[in-house]
């Protein structure tokens, strides 16, 4: 059906946002008040950052689509949306609720979201695309992350070379996503 891509994109967006918000909420509950210090960037800077994330994410999705050698609107649109939506973990700050720094910018979020996307869609490609969006987002942020949030909230800081490596890793995962999709299409057309 022509609108399959839209259904897939909506499912992926809901699952990704749900996991991001769940981890964020766990962060709000579990972080000791003395450590709750995540803040929102100045409102005037948000549109530019959002545009950067959206553009980067769309290009990740386009890379996956290109690698699949077929126009895949679900990859392209989801790539943009997911890369942007990782910052849903700043939401408590927007409502003046004390929260830890970037609770979903963590390896635990990555593992949880990849697993739940796969379990709910049964598509490895959507799990690898979600991981690509995650790494692209991290690569575009200043490189300090609570890698084990929401269990431990210690922040790990890296140099700019790590940011660049994360963006490259995101494109590599996008390429793998496209290759897997191409393979899946070839297999299904043989049946
Ligand atoms: Zn971020």
Image (cartoon, helix red, strand yellow):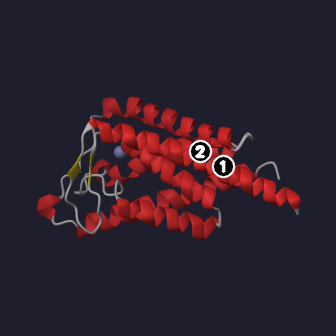
Circle 1 residues within 10 Å: few <14, some 14–19, many ≥20: some
- Label 1 C-beta lies within 8 Å of the nearest ligand 1 atom: no
Kind of element beneath mark 1: helix
Q: Residue furthest right?
A: 191
Q: Nearer the viewer, residue 159 or 11?
A: 159
Ligand 1's quadrant is top left
Q: Are marks 1 and 2 in contact (CB under 8 Å)?
A: yes
Q: Residue beneath label 1, please?
A: 179
The foreground one among 68 and 55 is 68
Residue 171 makes an appearance in the image: yes
* Between 51 and 164, the one nearer to me in the picture: 164
**Residue 175, numbered label:** 2
Residue 140 in sight in this render: no
Question: How many residues crowd mark 2 within 10 Å: few (<14), some (14–19), many (20+)?
Answer: many
The part of the image, by quadrant, that contains residue 166 is top left
Residue 190 lies, in percent from the top left, at: 87, 59
Kindly indicate the quadrant of the structure image that contains residue 76.
Answer: top right
The residue at the far left in this view is 34
x and y, in percent, of residue 74 in the image: 66, 47
- In the image, what residue occupies the spot 62% across and 43% down? 64
Q: How many marks?
A: 2
Please tell me which residue is depicted at 28% across the width and 36% down the height of the picture. 160
Q: Secondary structure at mark 2?
A: helix
Measured as percent of width and height from the top left, residue 67 is found at: 66, 41
Ligand 1 within 8 Å of the CB at mark 2 = no
Question: Which x, y percent locates residue 100?
Answer: 24, 57
Above or below: residue 34 compared with residue 82: below
| Quarter of the image with the C terminus in it | bottom right
Q: Mark 1 and mark 2: span between their CA atoms?
A: 6 Å
């Amino acid at each position: 059906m022509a609108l399959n891509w839209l259904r897939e994109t909506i499912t992926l967006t809901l699952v990704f946002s749900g996991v991001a918000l769940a981890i964020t909420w766990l962060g709000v509950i579990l972080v000791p008040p003395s450590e709750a210090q995540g803040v929102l960037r100045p409102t005037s800077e948000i549109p530019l950052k959002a545009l950067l994330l959206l553009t980067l994410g769309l290009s990740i999705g386009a890379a996956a689509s290109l690698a699949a050698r077929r126009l895949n609107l679900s990859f392209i649109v989801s790539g943009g949306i997911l890369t942007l939506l990782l910052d849903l973990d700043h939401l408590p700050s927007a409502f003046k609720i004390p929260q830890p720094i970037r609770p979903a910018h963590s390896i635990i979020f990555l593992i949880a979201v990849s697993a739940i996307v796969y379990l709910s869609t049964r598509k490895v490609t959507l799990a690898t695309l979600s991981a690509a969006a995650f790494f692209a987002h991290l690569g575009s942020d200043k490189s300090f992350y609570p890698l084990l949030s929401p269990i431990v909230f210690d922040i790990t800081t890296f140099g700019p070379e790590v940011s660049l490596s994360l963006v490259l890793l995101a494109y590599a995962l996008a390429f793998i996503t496209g290759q897997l999709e191409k393979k899946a299409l070839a297999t299904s057309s043989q049946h």
